[in-house]
Image (cartoon, helix red, strand yellow):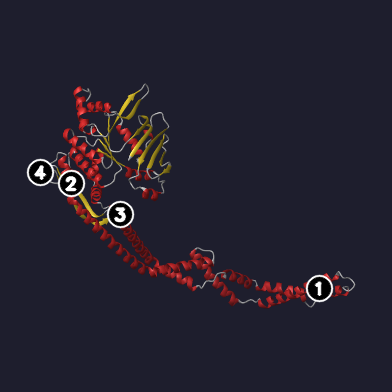
Amino acid sequence: MLKSLSIENYALIDSLNIEFAPGFSVITGETGAGKSIILGALSLILGQRADARQIKQGENKCLVEGVFDVSKYDLKSLFDEHDWVYEGETCILRREIWANGKSRAFLNDSPVYLNDLKALGDRLIDIHSQHQNLALNDRQFQLLVVDALADTRLLRGEYVSAFHSFRSAAKVLADLKEASRKNKEEEDYLRFQYAALSEAALREGEQEELEAELEALTHSEEIKSGLFAVTNLLSGEDQNVETMLKSALESVRNIQSVFPKADEIVQRLESAYLDLKDLRSETERLFDEIEFNPDRQQLVEDRLGVIYDLQKKHSVATVRQLIELRDDIGSKLQNIDSMEEKISSAENILSEKREQLSDLARRLSEKRLGAISDIEKELTSRLSYLGMPNARFECRITPKQQPDETGMDDVQFLFSANKNTDLLPVSQIASGGEISRLMLCVKAMIAGATALPTIIFDEIDTGTSGEMADKMGRIMQDMSRNMQVIAITHLPQIASKGDFHYIVYKKDTEDSTQTYMRQLSSEERITEIARLLSGAETTAQAIENAKVMLRKN
């Protein structure tokens, strides 16, 4: 329920604060007074897109805030789903629009996205205008009406969940089939690549070892000469390092007994002598190992050629990358080999999902069809009450070719206002008055079947008067027993039935024109209804008639 609405610097409104109550409220005012401005401001906090031109001329920012009582509408799950702050009873929606085109939306003082505001706004207020009568032509809207009156909410929730699961399973299968198709196109090439990489029997670190060996084989003569020179210098027949070091060691040992500090020198010379002997043995071993082997060199060059060719072919620089590529191709081939099994499994899952969906769609159709007769009878009865005794209405349900998110049913409303005319789709009804009355009956039926927080009728009574307007007002009055109803009207028959009466009016100042809205007192209400009855000049008779209408209602 809308408890209050505050508007600042919006269009012709400087500042407006208005409180609303439960039941039936009516809003009147002369044409052009600004009723549509107030609705426009309200639409902003319900998620409508903003336009900087809506800001009051000369101001930098406009603000609209609505306070709602949500205690009876079980919105906690919606708040939890969106991670909004839930305060139990009160919900505050606020919208700020800046002259630079920026806009911000808030829910309970926390910033939210505009789509979030709209999702919540759709659960708080239903603004019904003359333009919304066109929605009655929409088959999607017609289906929603049937679902509301057939009370399919829980079953349809199950169906929607099953439909999304079915769609997901269908996508998985389609993706697998597409992957299988692409795999088949490249399978031969992948197997050729994998065979070449596998036959190469690559080993990590092999390239570096082979390159080092090839370098040694290529320079074997030079290496042997160097090693021979080292060995000869260390222990050759002529004067050599090893002999000289041994002589130095003997000389120091001779003075060791008389010169204690020579002990350290002896130790170091002994260590150096042993290291040189090991070094000489190592160089001799290496000298013996190194030899020019053209056959081995050819084998190493051939092996490196295989590695280099694979690296060039696959645009990589290391054997590790070749091994990783081989393993990756191997994984792809394993997937190709198991693809048929995966597709078969996905087909089985999709078949199960389709059966579940078909069962829920059948149950949904049965529930809708079971409610059709009552819907047709009640709507026809309501239309008769609104001066259409010969009206006929049919809700025709036909199966769709393929299931969608709503089920397998295509709904079409057929209508005839007269005995001698054929039933036609609602979209072909020419009379605005007829479709207005039909829409009002539909909304009244929905209001009795579902919990709508607030409904606002924006001049839905256009094109009606007299007794029909009186009856339309009574329907709105009846609706207000279960929900908050606000009607913007020009008709005294409807205005007189409100529990509360507000007026929208303009005032001119030296600099500008301002729009205001306030609640009327009992005396002011008599005057306003008399104005609606008599027009420009309020007569004494109109005053008396207004008093009678108010007493009667």
Residue 174 circle label: none
Of tags 1 and 3, the one toward the viewer is 3
Would you place residue 162 above or below residue 94 in this image? below
* Pointer 4 or 3: first along the chain: 3
Q: Which residue is mark 2?
A: 378
* Pointer 1 or 2: first along the chain: 1
Of tags 4 and 1, the one toward the viewer is 4
* Pointer 2 or 3: first along the chain: 3
Residue 419 circle label: 4
Of tags 1 and 2, the one toward the viewer is 2
Residue 254 pos. (x, y %): 88, 75
C-alpha separation, residue under disc 1 versus residue under disc 3: 98 Å
Q: Badge 3 local density, few (<14 within 10 Å), some, or many (20+)?
A: few
Residue at image position (50%, 66%) is 324
Circles 1 and 3, Cβ within 8 Å, touching? The answer is: no
* Pointer 1 or 3: first along the chain: 3
* Pointer 4 or 1: first along the chain: 1
Q: Which residue is mark 1?
A: 245
Residue 446 pos. (x, y %): 24, 45
Residue 187 pos. (x, y %): 40, 68
Judging from the image, what secondary structure is the residue with disc 1 in?
helix
Q: Which residue is mark 3?
A: 157
Tell me the kind of residue under disc 3. Gly
C-alpha separation, residue under disc 2 versus residue under disc 3: 26 Å
> Is residue 260 rendered to the left or right of residue 118?
right
Circles 4 and 3, Cβ within 8 Å, touching? The answer is: no
